[in-house]
Amino acid sequence: MSAIATSMAPSEMEEFGELLTVDEVAALLKVSKIWVYEHTRSAGRCRSERLPHMKLGKYVRFHRQALQTFLRRSTMR
């Protein structure tokens, strides 16, 4: 378990929500890991077009709920 997870109470972890890895997001969206990484970068994209993510040191993580909201908004355009 990570240092973040061990320092949080179970109720705080539930509030924090589920974090997904790049591999999990790629599998969920049925795209390559490279595609996921490319869509987290700002080069040539406005913020609203990038996948919502957070950096934990060298790792990229995604809130499941933020990703679902992003996908819903993207399909309405």
Image (cartoon, rainbow, N blue to C red):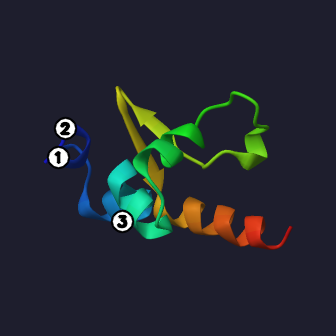
Question: Which disc number belongs to residue 14?
Answer: 3
Query: What kind of element bears circle 3?
Result: helix
**Res 18 visible:** no
Gap between marks 3 and 2 measured at Cα = 16 Å
> What amino acid type should be assigned to the residue bearing mark 2?
Ala
> What amino acid type should be assigned to the residue bearing mark 3?
Glu
Considering only vertical position in the picture, is 18 above or below 56?
Answer: below
Q: Quadrant of residue 65?
A: bottom right
Considering only vertical position in the picture, is 3 above or below 36?
Answer: above
**Callout 3 touching callout 2 (CB < 8 Å):** no
Question: Which disc number belongs to residue 3?
Answer: 2
Badge 3 density bin: few <14, some 14–19, many ≥20, Cα 10 Å = few
Residue 6 is situated, as x and y percent measured from the top left of the image, at 17, 46
At 36% from the left and 65% from the top, the residue drawn is 14
At 66% from the left and 67% from the top, the residue drawn is 71
User: Is residue 29 rendered to the left or right of residue 70?
Assistant: left
Q: Which residue is mark 1?
A: 6
Gap between marks 1 and 3 measured at Cα = 13 Å
Residue 28 is situated, as x and y percent measured from the top left of the image, at 43, 68
Residue 37 is situated, as x and y percent measured from the top left of the image, at 49, 40
> What amino acid type should be assigned to the residue bearing mark 1?
Thr
User: Is residue 47 rendered to the left or right of residue 11?
Assistant: right
**Callout 2 touching callout 1 (CB < 8 Å):** yes
Gap between marks 2 and 1 measured at Cα = 5 Å
Outermost residue, left side: 1
Badge 2 density bin: few <14, some 14–19, many ≥20, Cα 10 Å = few
Quadrant for the C terminus in the image: bottom right
